Image (cartoon, rainbow, N blue to C red):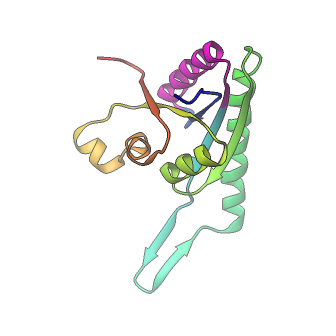
Amino acid sequence: MTPIKRILVPVDFSAPSEHATEYALGLAETLGADVALMHAYSLPVYALPDGGVMVGPEYAARVSSAAQASLDDCVARYSGRGVEVTGHLAEGVPHEEVTRLAAELNAQMVVMGTHGRAGMRHLLLGSVTERVVRTSKVPVLTVRLDPR
């Protein structure tokens, strides 16, 4: 078994994400690992009959700045607990960015929160966690906010 020295935790700043981060920090402390928090976002592209339209650079910069500020706040909130915590921001398809960054950072595990959506909400909104579980080359631990 590969020793776990780095845990990647994708965050979306929701309650399930915070719960998963707390869980990962406890696990990291027990294992002597560090935690890499990451936030991935995608910019909207609008499809039109004659092509697509992307958002302007000013909007993209505002979204990136806001995401970075939220991630920095998250890193600051979880630092100082005896576990090294770093932050990583990525623009792209979230589940693809999680698996890419796990490989890039040589993470041995991914810990993710799950919203527990079902039915039509799951069908319409999809599940980043589910896609990461299906495509990750490292173990993925899912943490549900309200276990049933």
Give the image quarter of residue 71: top right
- Does residue 52 appear left or right of residue 85 in this picture? left
Magenta stretch, main secondary structure, is: helix
Q: In which quarter of the image is the C terminus?
A: top left
- 55 and 88: which is toward the camera: 88
**Magenta residues (range):** 14-35
User: 49 above or below 5?
Assistant: below
Tell whether 130 sits left or right of 102: left
- Residue located 50% across and 25% down the image: 15
Q: In which quarter of the image is residue 12?
A: top right
Residue drawn at the location 26% of the way across and 36% of the way down = 118
Q: Where is residue 19 in the image (x, y as percent from the top left)?
A: 51, 21
Is 26 magenta? The answer is yes
Q: Which residue sits furthest left? A: 119
Residue 35, given in percent of the width and then of the height, sits at 66, 28
Q: What residue lies at 51% left-to-right and 67% top-to-bottom?
A: 45
Residue at figure coordinates x 40%, y 47% from the top left: 131
Q: Does the magenta stretch include residue 96?
A: no
Residue 107 image point, x, y percent: 61, 37
Between 9 and 31, which is closer to the camera in this rendering?
A: 31
**Left or right relative to 24: residue 76:** right
The picture places residue 24, in percent across and down from the top left corner, at: 57, 22
What residue occupies the far front of the structure in this picture? 1
Count of numbered circles in the view: 0
- 130 left or right, relative to 11: left
